[in-house]
């Protein structure tokens, strides 16, 4: 009499086959545990696989504080992990600062990933499944997303120094429910999952049941489409690199040499590389028009959200929008190795040196401070050079116009010592073998 493997054993074996090639023996694996059915099933499976595959399992519950039941969910996860003798970290996050700009769902996702990234555990397991994949694709299509947006969630993805793993991606929600019932698992139900005002819930409760009647394989077909989109997105990334992406600054001439679709693809790739959010289609068209059509000496600035695209000397710069500044800003320097310079949202580093940079002896003759331009400043960059106006000096060094009024000027008393990153006044330059300070 032949023995037929149970659904549970087949499920167990599928997950093991997914993880075994990617988790070296002795690895540490962190599970993102919400307490919902998906992550409870994954916790149960991973706990049974840990001795077999030789990894150590721990869990993290991210406490968003959105639901009035959030504390109860955290307590449930604590009790569950205690039953399995698995270490659990509960991470409290504040969604309020992000909610208005990104919405609840996207903000919660950003904060979860940020919480996982703070862990030093190299492998992170997430409980996304086939229904999540299909729902995400449909939402992105309805938002008019590009290929990157509608690409499939990958089974494995690098994020900083971690590897994100999604072992359940080929499993449907129905399969997870069957497994949970077979093992008499308990989980919590997020009350917001029943609220059809959330787009994802509308698809889940109203649209997909109708699709199921006519297209029972909708999960597989939508997942297959998402994989096709992901492959196409990879090809477009390769095209962008061949067209000149991959640099910190992008030459306008490279954009001008391309057809409109390839130019848009290159610009999208460049923005993504710089960590900027993807602009709306109309914003992207406006960027291309201004970058293409502006005079060489024009000060091009296109704002999108909290970011800006600028053009200077034929090069395209992408940056976060700079904050307003107090023109009377004055920071005293008392030997700290690092000073935050808010006008440019960057850090200034002071390092000890010998024979280069600023003479420590000269610098010790008065109070040292950092200030902004006030107008009329001059500086002699070399002993044999004439004094130069600040305007000429900054133009010669190719300092972009939007940085010129924000550059840190180092003073000793009322004497200008240096324009950080540009030039040191000849009178303050260190001589050979003299103790000195470098500022960058």
Image: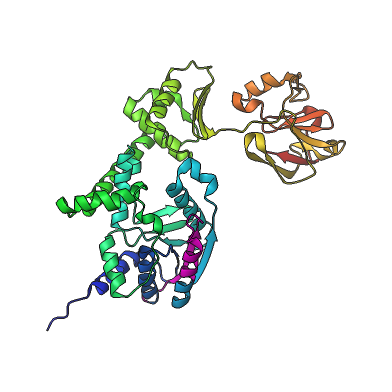
Q: Residue at x 32, y 37 (%)?
A: 144
Question: Which image quarter: residue 231?
Answer: top left
Up-down relation of residue 277 to residue 108 (above or below)? above
Q: Residue 165, how many percent across, how many down?
A: 38, 59
- Give the residue furthest to the bottom: 1
Q: Residue at x 84, y 37 (%)?
A: 367
Question: Which image quarter: residue 281?
Answer: top left
The N terminus, quarter of image: bottom left
Q: Residue 55, how many percent across, how many down?
A: 42, 71
Asked whether the viewer can see residue 244, the reply is: no
Asked whether the viewer can see residue 387, the reply is: yes
Q: Which residues are magenta?
A: 52-78
Up-down relation of residue 340 to residue 185 (above or below)? above
Q: Residue at x 17, y 80 (%)?
A: 3
Q: How many marks on residues?
A: 0
Q: Residue at x 44, y 68 (%)?
A: 27
Up-down relation of residue 303 to residue 338 (above or below)? above
Q: Residue 278, how many percent across, how many down?
A: 42, 37
Up-down relation of residue 429 to residue 376 (above or below)? below
- Give the residue furthest to the right: 365
Q: Nearer the viewer, residue 339 or 67?
A: 67
């Amino acid at each position: 009499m032949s023995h037929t493997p149970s659904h549970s054993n087949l499920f167990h074996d599928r997950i093991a086959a997914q993880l075994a090639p990617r988790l070296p023996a002795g690895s540490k694996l962190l599970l993102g545990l919400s307490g919902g059915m998906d992550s409870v099933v994954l916790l149960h499976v991973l706990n049974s696989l840990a001795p077999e595959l030789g990894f150590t399992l721990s869990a993290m519950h991210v406490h968003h504080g959105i639901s009035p039941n959030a504390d109860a969910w955290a307590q449930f996860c604590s009790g569950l992990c205690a039953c399995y003798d698995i270490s659990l970290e509960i991470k409290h996050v504040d969604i309020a600062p992000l909610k208005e700009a990104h919405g609840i769902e996207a903000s919660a996702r950003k904060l979860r990933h940020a919480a996982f990234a703070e862990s030093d555990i190299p492998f992170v397991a997430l409980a996304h499944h086939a229904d999540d994949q299909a729902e995400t694709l449909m939402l992105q299509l309805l938002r008019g997303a590009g290929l990157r947006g509608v690409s499939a969630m990958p089974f494995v993805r690098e994020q900083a120094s971690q590897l994100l793993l999604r072992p359940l991606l080929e499993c449907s929600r129905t399969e997870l429910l069957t497994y949970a019932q077979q093992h008499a698992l308990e989980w919590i139900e997020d009350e917001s999952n029943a609220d059809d005002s959330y787009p994802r819930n509308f698809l889940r409760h109203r649209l997909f049941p109708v699709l199921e009647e006519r297209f029972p394989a909708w999960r597989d077909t939508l997942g297959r489409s998402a994989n096709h989109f992901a492959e196409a997105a990879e090809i477009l990334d390769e095209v962008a690199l061949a067209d000149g992406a991959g640099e910190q600054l992008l030459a306008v001439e490279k954009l001008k040499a391309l057809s409109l679709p390839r130019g848009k693809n290159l610009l999208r790739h460049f923005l993504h590389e710089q960590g900027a959010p993807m602009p709306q289609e109309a914003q992207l068209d406006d960027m291309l028009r201004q970058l293409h059509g502006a005079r060489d000496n024009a000060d091009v600035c296109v704002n999108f959200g909290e970011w800006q695209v600028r053009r200077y000397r034929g090069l395209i710069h992408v940056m976060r929008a700079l904050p307003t500044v107090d023109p009377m800003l004055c920071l005293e320097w008392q030997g700290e190795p690092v000073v935050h310079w808010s006008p440019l949202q960057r850090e200034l580093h002071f390092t000890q040196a010998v024979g280069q940079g600023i003479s420590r002896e000269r610098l010790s003759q008065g109070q040292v401070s950092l200030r902004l331009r006030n107008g009329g400043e001059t500086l002699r960059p070399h002993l044999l050079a004439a004094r130069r106006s600040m305007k000429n000096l900054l133009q010669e060094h190719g300092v972009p116009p939007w940085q010129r009024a924000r550059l840190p000027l180092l003073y000793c008393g009322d004497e200008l010592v240096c324009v950080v990153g540009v030039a040191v006044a000849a009178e303050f330059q260190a001589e050979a073998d003299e103790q000195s300070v470098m500022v960058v």
